[in-house]
Image (spheres, helix red, strand yellow):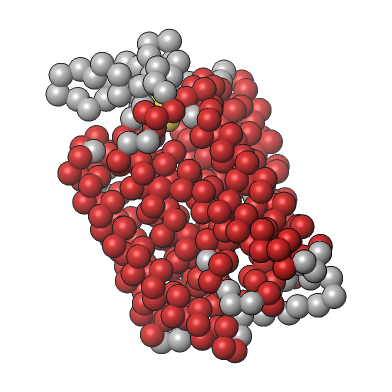
Amino acid sequence: MDLNLFWFVTLGVLLAGYAILDGFDLGVGILHLGARDDRERRVFMNSIGPLWDGNEVWLVTFGGALFAAFPNAYATAFSGFYLAFVLLLFALIFRAVSIEFRSKRESAAWRRFFDYCFFAASTLATFLFGVAIGNCIKGIPIGRDMEYAGTFFDLLRPYPLIVGLFAVSMFAMHGSIYLYLKTEGDLQKRIHGWIWQTFGFFLVMYLFTTLWTLAKIPHATRNFDQHEWAWLVVFLNVLAIANIPRALHLNRPLYAFVSSACCIAAFVFLFGVALYPYLLVSSLDPPAGLAFNPAYSLDIHNAASSPKTLQIMQIIAFLGMPFVLAYTVIIYWTFRGKVEIGRFSY
């Protein structure tokens, strides 16, 4: 594997890790207002309280790796998505502030304000992640100079918005299954009903988004002709989706959660297959017969750092990733089990 391909794959692994781990955090936030009282909302926040900031390390690592390995793609993405990234940053900040400040005062108005902030920030962040992915697949106006040639409103096209809603549905389902694992009693029974509702919403959005992609984004499947083995991931993804209701019916929620995580990993993989070898696809002045312009698009070669930089980064990655994985495993093992509300809880 050459260094450019190695870092393309590594970015995919980091993105999948973030989507799986912080995905249920965001899903809990999306479902937060469904809690009936203050205690239930505290249970929701404490289910992710010891984990959410560690999960975001994967996003920070992804951004750092993108900046160092593919600086041209990083610069173009941040110039094109600047306002969207500012909104995302505010959403992530308000989510963190809501978790940390909500229970600092007994005032009902104070807690209600941060409850709505937590819900809104989690939903907006998830939606913006989906919109960004939709734009990457659809293509954005990038000129010969690798500069974004559109406006913020050019990003709000129907397909990216649909992908944003799909992301919200997927994380809501993922978060509801996680909450079922962390709760008990009457709350857990109600969450069981939420799982079926969020799974239904997810299934509708999955089918709709898939059909739209196949019908309107022909270049998204171009690599499947050359790499037919990628269809195996599509098949496994369908099996993972089908296993979620099966696992719930058999009262095996952990299997349902693993299946949900596998679905997210498969979606990230298919996203990478749809893009490869590009990082950002240009929709500006496409040649006849093509839906995008390969000459203006940024790929893993024209957007990459020098080979020496990629090599040094590879060594750092091999040294650092075991620590990230070990930290993640230790934290999840330490805070396993059901949520208990105590004196020092959120």
- Compared across the picture, whether 329 is left or right of 120 comes to right
Name the spot of residue 176 as percent of width and height, x first: 50, 71
Image: 77 above or below 215: above
Q: In the image as oriented, which residue stretches furthest toward the left?
A: 289
Q: Residue at x 42, y 41 (%)?
A: 131
User: Could you say which quadrant of the image residue 106 lies in?
Assistant: bottom right
Does the rendering let one see residue 309? yes
Name the spot of residue 31 as percent of width and height, x first: 53, 66
- Compared across the picture, whether 272 is left or right of 37 comes to left
Image: 133 above or below 282: below
Q: Residue at x 44, y 38 (%)?
A: 132
- Compared across the picture, whether 313 is left or right of 294 comes to right
Looking at this view, is 119 or 233 the one in front?
A: 119
Q: Residue at x 65, y 71 (%)?
A: 41
Looking at this view, is 305 or 36 the one in front?
A: 36
Name the spot of residue 306 as percent of width and height, x first: 57, 18
Name the spot of residue 337 as percent of width and height, x first: 67, 78
Does the rendering let one see residue 7? no
Tell me the quarter of the image containing the C terminus: bottom right
Q: In the image as oriented, which residue stretches furthest toward the top?
A: 145
Q: Residue at x 39, y 76 (%)?
A: 196
